[in-house]
Image: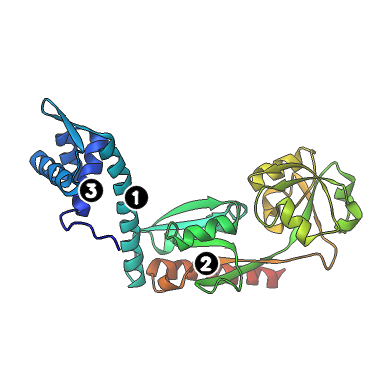
Amino acid sequence: MVRLGEDISSRKLEVLVAYLEHRTLSAAADALNTSAVSVHRALHSLEDSVRCSLFRHEGRVLVPTEAAHTLAGVAQDVLGRLERGIEATRAAAGYSSDRLKIGSLYSLTSHLLPELIKAMNQRRPNVQCELVLGKSRNELLPRLRQGLVDSVFAEISPADTDLVCLPLFEDEPCFAAPLSSPLAALDAITLADHAGEKTVTLAEGPFSAERLAERFPDFRPTVVMEVQDIFTQMNLVASGMACAVVPGRIRAMYQHLVRFVPLAEGQGARQTIGLCFMKARERDPNLLALSSVARLFVRGRERDAARA
């Protein structure tokens, strides 16, 4: 293990970052709520600690060298990691933050997330919710495990043993066809009967061309375009360019523009959509509140289904 000198402190690194950002001793001092003399002393002490020149003097001005910029870049990364580590430590001990970063698939922003965030704001009005969007669970879950987001709404899997996963609903894929397409008149569709159909797919995730070929090997569509997000995909379908196999959860947003045809029985390949967060943070009050909001959402859907 590399041992740093005891005189290299996080405070000195903060001073360096502030000075390079604000460019003068007085401005950096104002940003740090200290004096210009203290900033000047910290910079010289840091220079002594790293045993190389970080600044050159032009009159009374300290001009940062390339070495200073290099150290400042490292300092920003270290300070960011330290801040996230302290937040995770406090969360593990049951102390919550006033900010909650929620990761979500794009396709859940049309109905699920607005409702849940609104309910969360009502339950904990002092907590600011920040939404971080991703194209697939493979993009979102690494962010969760790295501490870049506090929770994730995406497909859940039994393999996620390090996570607390709360199922919200079962989602089933369907076939999206332009309203002008003859396929829009079908009550159900067998994908194998329409090999070669012009299709637009997502570039990543379970609805990418590669994953669709694994799940529906007899379909073999003609992929005319791959896109990065589901909204672009649905707009292309609505324009009449091509069809698509999509998650059923997108129906509510595009049902007036696109015909969503159920897949014939046996082709469903359902996904379980849920809320996930790290087990190490299961006592975090903010995540407990979010879990309660999610459970109320599930009960509401069950009541609506019973009435229907």
Which circle marks residue 13 in the picture? 3
Residue at (39% x, 63% y) in the render: 124
Against 92, residue 105 (above or below) is: above
- The alpha-carbon separation of the residues under discs 2 and 3 comes to 35 Å
N-terminal-most mark, 2 or 3: 3
Residue 67 visible here: yes
Residue 130 image point, x, y percent: 44, 53
Find disc 1 in the rendering and name its residue: 77
Nearer to us in this view, 90 or 298: 90
Q: Crowdedness of circle 3 by 10 Å Cα count: few (<14), some, many (20+)?
A: many
Which residue sits furthest top?
59
Relative height, residue 177 to residue 295 (above, below)? above
In-front residue for pair 102/42 = 42
What residue is rendered at 60% in x and 51% in y? 135
Return the mark for residue 223: none
Classed neighbour count for the residue bearing mark 1: other residues with Cα under 10 Å, few (<14), some (14–19), many (≥20) = few
Dividing the picture into quadrants, the one containing residue 156 is bottom right
Residue 111 x, y percent position in the rendering: 60, 55
Residue visible at 38% across and 59% down? 125
Q: What amino acid does circle 3 point to? A: Leu
Q: Amino acid at mark 1?
A: Asp
In the rendered structure, which amino acid carries the disc numbered 2? Cys
Dots 2 and 1: beta carbons under 8 Å? no
The span from disc 1 to disc 3 (Cα, nearest Å) is 11 Å
> Of label 2 and label 1, which has the lower sequence position?
1
Residue carrying label 2: 276
Would you say the residues marked 1 and 3 are in contact, meaning their CB atoms lie under 8 Å apart?
A: no
Q: How far apart, in angstroms, are the residues tagged by discs 2 and 1?
A: 26 Å
Element at badge 3?
A: helix
Query: Looking at the figure, which quarter contains the N terminus?
Result: bottom left
Q: Nearer the viewer, residue 236 or 302?
A: 236
